[in-house]
Amino acid sequence: MLDTLIHKNLGLLRYRSTHENITFSTLGPEGTSSEFATKKLIDYLDIESHYELYPSYEQAAESIVQGNADFLVVANAYQNINKFYINNELDFFFCFLQNTLPYGIAISEKTFYPSKPALLIASHPAPAHLIELLPKKYRSKTKIIYSSSTSQAAHQVKIGEVDLCITNQSSAEINELKFISRLQTIEMLWTIFKSKTNNDY
């Protein structure tokens, strides 16, 4: 297995030698851990490349199928990743380990009113169990609203759609939010997929 991964890693470098630029697609918007991991991968490979961000992994995958990008980057914690592994148009290429950005529960000091009788917290489904980080005095009156990404969850707090969110440090900073819980980094496996028709590696 390790030999296979090394071979495919080298294959990606060979792919770069015959292409002016490599495009990765992953989950957006700006500030997601998917973007962070993709940046780390690009830095590690030290190749000329860039990435595109999409509202969902499914839309990012479609860009691969349509030939608008070369590789798809997906977190293995994504609840529907099986759709990419078991797919008539995509193939597994390789995987890598990369810690996520620190996660926690954040609020906007401009719009958070803790005395409200009920609170809404936005989260992507994958880290939703981190609601356990929420101070106990809020847990019984808080309901989870699912978002397409932790960055989107942070934006929902910023615009006042929800009261709190489970998000990462980058998204919190972008949306001017403040953490009210401790932060937790997640060791994550990331999978790279390619189009079945792409054999140039």
Image (cartoon, rainbow, N blue to C red):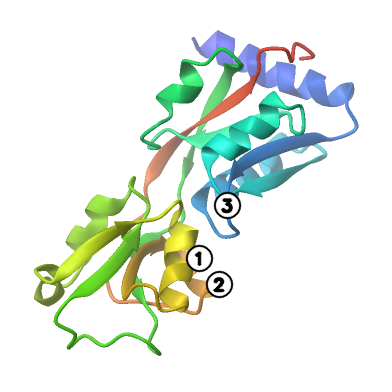
Judging by the rendered image, the residue that carries numbered circle 2 is: 174
Closer to the camera: disc 2 or disc 3?
3
From the viewer's perspective, is 155 left or right of 71?
left
On the rendered image, what quadrant is the C terminus found in? top right
Image location of residue 110, percent across then percent down: 40, 90
Image location of residue 40, percent across then percent down: 62, 45
Could you tell me if the residues under marks 2 and 3 are in contact, i.e. CB atoms within 8 Å?
Answer: no
Image location of residue 184, percent across then percent down: 33, 57
Judging by the rendered image, the residue that carries numbered circle 1 is: 171
- Give the number of the disc on residue 28: 3
Q: 136 or 60: which is nearer to us?
A: 60
Name above or below for residue 69 compared with residue 135: above
- Crowd band around label 1 with a 10 angstrom C-alpha radius: few (<14), some (14–19), many (20+): many
Q: 88 or 151: which is nearer to us?
A: 88
Q: 62 or 124: which is nearer to us?
A: 62
User: In the structure shown, which secondary structural element does the residue marked by tag 3 occupy?
Assistant: loop
- Crowd band around label 2 with a 10 angstrom C-alpha radius: few (<14), some (14–19), many (20+): some
Image location of residue 90, percent across then percent down: 59, 18
From the viewer's perspective, is 7 left or right of 199?
left
**Alpha carbon separation for disc pair 1 and 2:** 5 Å
Q: Which residue is drawn at 61% across and 38% down?
A: 60
Q: Which residue is drawn at 16% across and 72% down?
A: 135
In the rendered structure, which amino acid carries the disc numbered 3? Gly
User: In the structure shown, which secondary structural element does the residue marked by tag 1 occupy?
Assistant: helix
Q: Residue at x 65, y 16 (%)?
A: 8
Can residue 126 be seen by looking at this rendering?
Answer: yes
**Alpha carbon separation for disc pair 1 and 3:** 11 Å
